[in-house]
Image (cartoon, grey):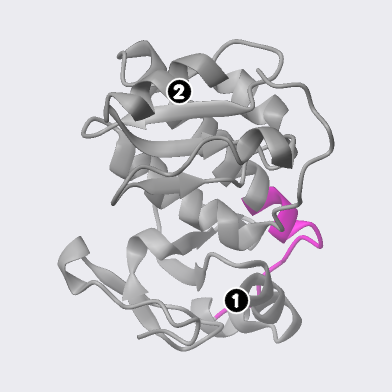
Amino acid sequence: MTRGGVQKDRSEGSERKCIATGETQPKQGLIRFVMGPEGQVVPDVMEKLPGRGVYVTSSHSALETAVKKKLFARGFKSQVQVSSGLAGEVETQVARRLVGLISLARKSGDAVAGFEKVKDWLAKEEARVLIQASDGSGRGKSKLSTPYKGKFIGCLTADELGMAFGRQTVIHAALASGGLSKRVVDEAQRLQGLRETVGGSGRTEG
């Protein structure tokens, strides 16, 4: 079990050690970094960049620790350049990745948006993941419940969720089981650790 009280699942694939916490955990809960050609620390959210990688737990505090204690230099065994806005850059990349995955799910027919459509999927037990905008109306969001044994995602803003569905804003969305749902949930968990989820700001339902 990690310090945050989350049970480790060693069946999820390979594990890596976080340079900030010293804990070993499944890769989907970590952010990979590589060293660029000029010694700069580069986040590799997609895990496709070449070179030796070091890993940091996907949380704002872990990233701050890695930067402040100069742990990237220790991890790469070399002098490195770390951007002062590294945490924000990582958050932006993970959010973009999550939006992209939800968009793919929409295009394959495995995601819907809008209060009535989501309510219908929940009633028919077709929804396995409920997604609601972090800045949506608390009153409106309380009218829908997470599916039984399903998942809830609440770390995207209405604007970000809207991008996934080709709209200006979206407050409520849902994913069917299978398809990209697990990848969406994994990416959302990474983003959740990188940003603070704030309550409703009175957005209209959409």
From this view, report whether residue 62 is shown above or below residue 111.
Answer: below
Q: Position of residue 59 (x, y in %)?
A: 60, 67
Please state which of residues 31 and 51 is positioned toward the viewer in this rendering.
Answer: 31
Query: Could you tell me if residue 40 is visible in this image?
Result: yes
Query: Could you tell me if residue 45 is visible in this image?
Result: no
From this view, report whether residue 180 is shown above or below residue 183.
Answer: above
In the figure, is residue 161 to the left or right of 47?
A: right
User: Mark 2 and mark 1 in contact (Cβ < 8 Å)?
Assistant: no
> Which residue appears farthest toward the left when viewing the image?
11
Whole-number angstrom distance, CA of label 1 to CA of label 2: 43 Å
Kindly identify which numbered label has been placed on residue 118: 2
Give, as a three-letter code, the residue at label 1: Phe
Q: Position of residue 204 (x, y in %)?
A: 77, 21
Task: Name the residue located 58 percent from the left edge and 56 percent from the top edge.
Answer: 192
> Which segment is the magenta one?
78-90
Please state which of residues 68 and 166 is positioned toward the viewer in this rendering.
Answer: 166
Q: Position of residue 100 (x, y in %)?
A: 48, 27
Does the magenta portion include 83?
Answer: yes
Please state which of residues 134 and 138 is positioned toward the viewer in this rendering.
Answer: 138
In the figure, is residue 25 to the left or right of 99?
A: left
Q: Position of residue 118 (x, y in %)?
A: 45, 23
Give, as a three-letter code, the residue at label 2: Val
Which numbered disc flags the more N-terminal residue, 1 or 2? 1
Q: Which residue is mark 1?
A: 72
Quadrant of the drawing holding the N terminus: bottom left
Does the magenta portion include 123?
Answer: no
Secondary element type, mark 2: helix
